[in-house]
Image (cartoon, grey):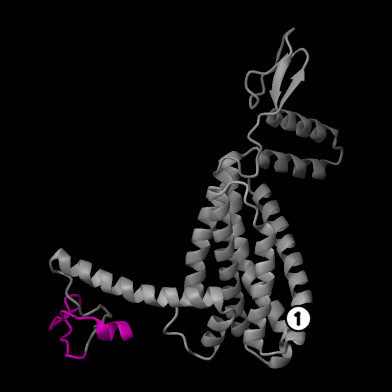
Amino acid sequence: MQRDVRKNRRKFTQCPNCGYSFEEVNNYCPNCGQENHDLNVPVKHLIVEFLEGTIHYDTKTWRTIKYLLFRPGLLTEKFNIGQRAAYVPPFRLYVFVSIVFFFVLALSTNAPGVGTDQKEVQVTVPGVHIEDPLTDSVLYTSEPAVVTSEAQAIAVSDSALQAIEDPTFKTAMTRLVSFSKGGEQAKQKLLKNTSFMMFILMPFFAYLLYLFYYKQRRNYVEHLMFSIHLHTFFFVIIIIATSLALVFSGLDLEGWVVVLMLVYLFFALKQVYKQSYGQTLLKLIPLSFLYCLTLAIFLLGTLAVSVMMS
């Protein structure tokens, strides 16, 4: 509403959508809901309005990001006590950050040298020559063959599959190997399912908080807001760490990221739930363990679903 007050409106006397006769105080049509604002103006006016709205939005955004990064738990506390207008809504913030997160994650998996050895490992196999390691054609010649490490891994996996006797397990492993050879399509499917998994993980973690702080008689939605802000922070930190790793090759920040997440969770719990440092630490240890266990199970489940859907 604050934004509507500041807006310099060019008002109609009659709604162009439904014909309702406006009064001076009507910023929106009481009949159909359309905004009482004439957009049929020179482009320069629209640009000025856009910049005004963007600056106003950015003020709210930067305030939200500042509190999210440097004041653990404060955004959740302000939401719970009803101070919400000055900040980006938690769910909207999470959606935006998660989109950036999975975009950066996709870039990192495509980047050369990330998670792979750029030197081609060659294995000489007497009597075999493979023109293309990804094709099934094998030409037997008298010359030694040069086989890439990728082709060797595929050959080993195929041989291991043939040795499996249990039909159910063999089917599952065959799907897994096939999925691992799926390349870009398989990776995109896994990322999509992982994003959905994280969306499910947040309310589950909120339920853990509900159980741990049951005696405080808080509504579940308060724990859910805590979970949303927490995971948003996790995504921002991983985005920063991954981006730095892309720019500075060889930079390993995984350990620091985990430590920072634990420290942030500790102070966020302390800020929102108002317990002593000792009580917060006693809650943090089992809560972190259960969260990591749950995350591992959810990730394995996501991989299984992705493989079965391939």
Q: Which quadrant, please, contains the C terminus?
A: top right
Q: Is residue 63 above or below residue 272?
A: above
Q: Residue at x 58, y 51 (%)?
A: 245
Q: Which quadrant, please, contains the N terminus?
A: bottom left
The magenta stretch is 1-25
**In-front residue for pair 212/192:** 212
| Residue 169 position within the rendered picture, expressed as x and y whole percent measured from the top left | 81, 44
| Residue 63 position within the rendered picture, expressed as x and y whole percent measured from the top left | 44, 77
Which residue carries the number 1 mark?
281
Residue 119's quadrant in the figure? top right
**In-front residue for pair 251/159:** 251
Q: Is residue 138 above or below residue 199?
A: above
Q: Is residue 37 left or right of residue 63?
A: left
Question: Does the segment drawn in magenta span residue 47?
Answer: no
- Amino acid on which the number 1 mark rests in the picture: Leu
Q: Is residue 36 above or below residue 186?
A: below
Question: Does the segment drawn in magenta span residue 12?
Answer: yes
Using the rendered image of the protein, determine whether residue 1 is visible from the camera's viewpoint: no
Q: Residue at x 73, y 92 (%)?
A: 215
Residue 263's quadrant in the figure? bottom right
Q: Residue at x 71, y 42 (%)?
A: 175
| Residue 16 position within the rendered picture, expressed as x and y whole percent measured from the top left | 16, 76
Q: Main secondary structure of the magenta part?
A: loop
Asked which secondary structure carries label 1, the reply is helix
| Residue 118 position within the rendered picture, expressed as x and y whole percent measured from the top left | 63, 34
Q: Is residue 81 above or below residue 291?
A: below
Residue 115's quadrant in the figure? top right
